[in-house]
Amino acid sequence: MNAHDQENESGSPTAYGKDADAIKSRCQQMRARILVEALALSDEFVQRRTQAAGGLFDPLNLSVRARGNSIQIYWVLMHFREGRHKGTTNVPKNRGATDYDLAKLKARCADWLQEIAVDIEMRARPMRESLKLLGEIERAADVVARRMSGGTKATPDTEAHAATAHNSETT
């Protein structure tokens, strides 16, 4: 008897889907808390930048964007022409990384702002890492629920793997 033949605790394959939904719901709650903290961190950066400026201005800003299940915490350079906001440019970071290179971040801002930017970046890093992990947890919960409820979709790779496994069992 393999894992697909065994019944789960409640006896129905939809229980795995309910468990996955509970996990995803908890992840959403955590994501909402992180969003509130990230927005507060962005506001704190603006406030500290204004206090430290002494009449100077630096275009570096920490932005937070929430769209659906996605929350992005990223650095931008604001562009102004004739006193009017004209757009932003994202500060580059390494592809796939959840954090910004501190040396590159310092190079993008004035000397008087570097200490504040580094402090805020160090506090934003755990938030970005947590958001990444929450996404991975949600995807893993979906995969487990699909596999345990028998709802896996056959792809050429899974069919080839199943045929290979079946052939090795019969020989």
Image (cartoon, rainbow, N blue to C red):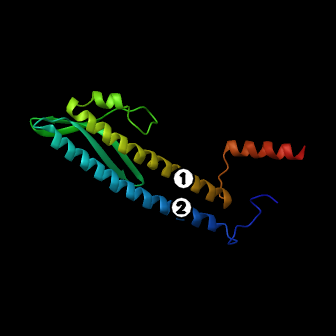
Q: Quadrant of the C terminus?
A: top right
The disc placed on residue 137 is: 1
Quarter assignment of residue 161: top right
Q: Amino acid at mark 1?
A: Ile
SS at mark 2? helix
Q: Alpha-carbon neighbours of circle 2 within 10 Å: few (<14), some, or many (≥20)?
A: some
Percent of width and height locating residue 50: 16, 43
Percent of width and height locating residue 42: 28, 47
User: Which residue carries the number 2 mark?
Assistant: 23
For the view shown, which residue lies furthest in the right direction?
A: 171
Q: Is residue 11 left or right of residue 17?
A: right
Q: Looking at the image, which residue is at 42% across and 56% down?
A: 31
Q: Are marks 2 and 1 in contact (CB under 8 Å)?
A: yes
Q: Looking at the image, which residue is at 76% across and 64% down?
A: 6
Q: Amino acid at mark 2?
A: Ile
**Mark 1 or mark 2, which is nearer the start of the sequence?**
2
SS at mark 1? helix
Residue 154 or residue 52, whichever sits in front? 52
Quarter assignment of residue 167: top right
The disc placed on residue 146 is: none
Whether residue 86 is situated above or below residue 144 in the rendered picture: above
Q: Is residue 120 left or right of residue 78?
A: right
